[in-house]
Image (cartoon, rainbow, N blue to C red):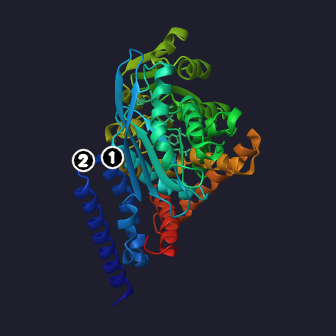
Amino acid sequence: MSTLSSTASATASAEEYVQRVYSEVTRRDPLEQEFHQAVKEILECLVPVLARHPQYQANAVLERLVEPERTISFRVPWTDDAGAVRVNRGYRVQFNSAIGPYKGGLRFHPSVYSGIIKFLGFEQIFKNALTGLPIGGGKGGSDFDPKGKSDREVMAFTQSFMTELYRHIGQDTDIPAGDIGVGAREIGYMFGQYKRIHGGHEAGVLTGKGLLYGGSLARKEATGYGLVYFVQEMLAAQCQNFEGQTVVVSGSGNVSIYAIEKLQQLGALVVACSDSGGYIYDPQGINLDTVKRLKEQERARISEYVTAHPHAEYTEGSTGIWTIPCRIALPCATQNELDEDAARALVSGGVIAVGEGANMPSTLPAINYFLQQGILFAPAKAANAGGVAVSGLEMSQNGMRLSWSFEEVDERLRMIMKNIYRSSVRAAEEYDMPGNLVAGSNIAGFLKVADAMLAQGVV
Ligand SMILES: NC(=O)C1=CN([C@@H]2O[C@H](COP(=O)(O)OP(=O)(O)OC[C@H]3O[C@@H](n4cnc5c(N)ncnc54)[C@H](O)[C@@H]3O)[C@@H](O)[C@H]2O)C=CC1
Ligand SMILES: O=C(O)CCC(=O)C(=O)O
């Protein structure tokens, strides 16, 4: 066979393999749509890798990758302020430990079900591999809604959640952290309960802890800052930077707030942000002190921003934010918040770069549209890996019983984001998709995990 026809037949066989694995995923768990979407995006990028390296198919690497090593689901009973007993469902998916202990956040949001936790856990495997740190992939959470709950109710829920979760986690087995609805308050209550049940001060069992009891400086800032560092690399490769650029950032939680902070430090004009109720547009530039006060202290709605800044506008409904003309857009709220219509609106509005701070914020048609239009696109797995990377650094500090300065952690974060950018660019080039960081990051993450799996035999 000529080289050309043997390459074509290897590609056809890899395509058929990917299709078979994907069909099996959808057949086994037909309702887990977000998980299907995450699997589809990755598997499609892997065709050239599988064609070039038949050992992955021969050893059923994909079949093993899409099946979590362990899935835990449990009852979480707690008592509300009126004395009524409430019951939520808790989850922890321990997806893949080929390169280290399971690592990934906990999400508390009413939309949580197995499909959300599995998509997040699956993404986490490759993201964690990209950081270069020895951490495997996992994720967890609950359909508990912290919105409108008193501190006492949140404490009662989180203590009950940890009363079951504690037996499945540990500093060398599985290390949870925060995600949507889980911040410093929730991590603090969970750490207290873990310590009480388990005994001893096992600092490395959770990350995102408060600075007084084993947390790392710069963990709070890490995902947002890391996202901006990644996009900075992508812009620099085109001789561009953030100075004077108009930026739209969705969400107003942990990731968004610290992305906005770093953007403003770098001279960008951030004109909009949002929450699940709607978005604010402030042509003079978002006042971050007001957003921090509303979101970090008062747990208020973003609509209240206009009380302090009457020249700004509030619009109900969060998706309209993408119709605001801007040069750079950073979706930092939630999955599938940016669809193809939104992508078209952004391109019409002059966007040159999109960086994903949230996990899977863009739908597949939106991603394809950006790529077709030549928009610089920083995919979540690579661009938002700064949070888990600094969680890994928090674990290192806990293990060594010391604390690094903010500057030291921030510098390490900057280097990690630079390395993720470079390895994604390199992998895209090696597989003939130059500039496609979606393919590059999926391939670079996959190769590390797949080779570690091969080295460890059929487990
Ligand atoms: N916290 C972290 O270190 C990391 C978070 N992420 C991802 O970043 C995203 C945001 O997470 P966090 O900031 O930690 O959560 P958070 O709970 O601090 O904030 C979430 C924000 O998104 C808003 N939101 C929720 N649904 C929305 C919608 N449909 N439209 C507009 N706004 C909406 C909420 O009102 C809130 O302002 C999630 O996708 C999460 O998985 C990714 C990597 C690390
Ligand atoms: O810091 C961590 O361990 C997890 C962060 C996270 O959940 C994510 O990267 O999506």
Q: Is residue 133 above or below residue 149?
A: below
Question: Residue placed farthest to the bottom in the image?
Answer: 1
Q: Which residue is mark 2?
A: 31
Q: Is residue 174 visible?
A: yes
Q: Residues within 10 Å of mark 2 (few under 14, many from 20)?
A: few
Amino acid type of the residue that numbered disc 2 sits on in the rendered structure: Leu
Tag count: 2
| Of the pair 342 and 81, the residue shown nearer to us | 81
Looking at the picture, how far across and down is residue 182, in whole percent?
50, 33
Amino acid type of the residue that numbered disc 1 sits on in the rendered structure: Gly
Quadrant of the image containing the C terminus: bottom left
**Spatial CA span between label 1 and label 2:** 7 Å
Looking at the picture, how far across and down is residue 20, in whole percent?
26, 67
Q: Which residue is mark 1?
A: 115
Report if the CB atoms under discs 1 and 2 are less than 8 Å apart. Answer: yes
Q: What residue do we see at 46% from left, 22% from top?
A: 153
Q: Residues within 10 Å of mark 1 (few under 14, many from 20)?
A: some
Q: Which of the marked residues, 1 or 2, is nearer the chain's N terminus? A: 2
